Image: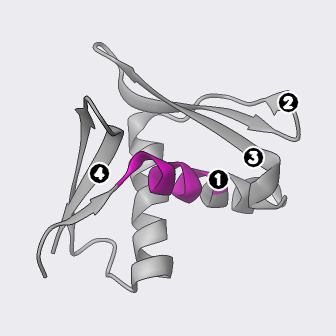
Amino acid sequence: MEELKLFEQEIINAICTYVADQHYVYPENVMVELTYEDDEGYGAEIEVNGKIQSPLTEPKVVEAIRKWLEEEYQLDPFAVSLRLDIEDAEGIVAYVNE
């Protein structure tokens, strides 16, 4: 498999689905803003049904993406390498290699 690139919107979709499963709500009820801090790495600010939740840390963002890869791409989530990056034109992206 060649390298798969997940754009920012797909990462947000993955996190919405992940958080919705945890809170027993529809993904449409989850708002996500991706973040990056030099000292903390990648993360996400989360709102569920209009209520602010604890932010997701980078390991949880990666976990959400891995779950998305399994469900949407039928990939073994632990057999792939995953790298997050920031690109000027596209924002936060994820590179996936099998």
Whether residue 12 appears in magenta in the rendering, the answer is yes
Q: Which residue, given by chain and number where applicable, does mark 3 sit on?
A: 30
Q: If you read the primary sequence from the N terminus, does the residue marked by circle 1 or circle 2 appear first?
A: 1
Q: Amino acid at mark 1?
A: Cys
Q: Main secondary structure of the magenta part?
A: helix
Q: Residue at x 34, y 72 (%)?
A: 77
Horizontal and vertical percent position of residue 21:
72, 62
Which of the 4 quarters of the picture holds residue 46?
Answer: top right
Horizontal and vertical percent position of residue 16:
64, 53
Q: Amino acid at mark 2?
A: Lys
Residue 21 against residue 30 in the figure, above or below: below
Q: Are marks 3 and 1 in contact (CB under 8 Å)?
A: yes
Badge 3: few (under 14), some or many (20 or more) residues near its Cα, within 10 Å? many
Q: Which residue, given by chain and number where applicable, does mark 2 sit on?
A: 51
C-alpha separation, residue under disc 4 versus residue under disc 2 = 27 Å
Q: Which numbered marker is on residue 16?
A: 1
Q: Which numbered marker is on residue 80?
A: none
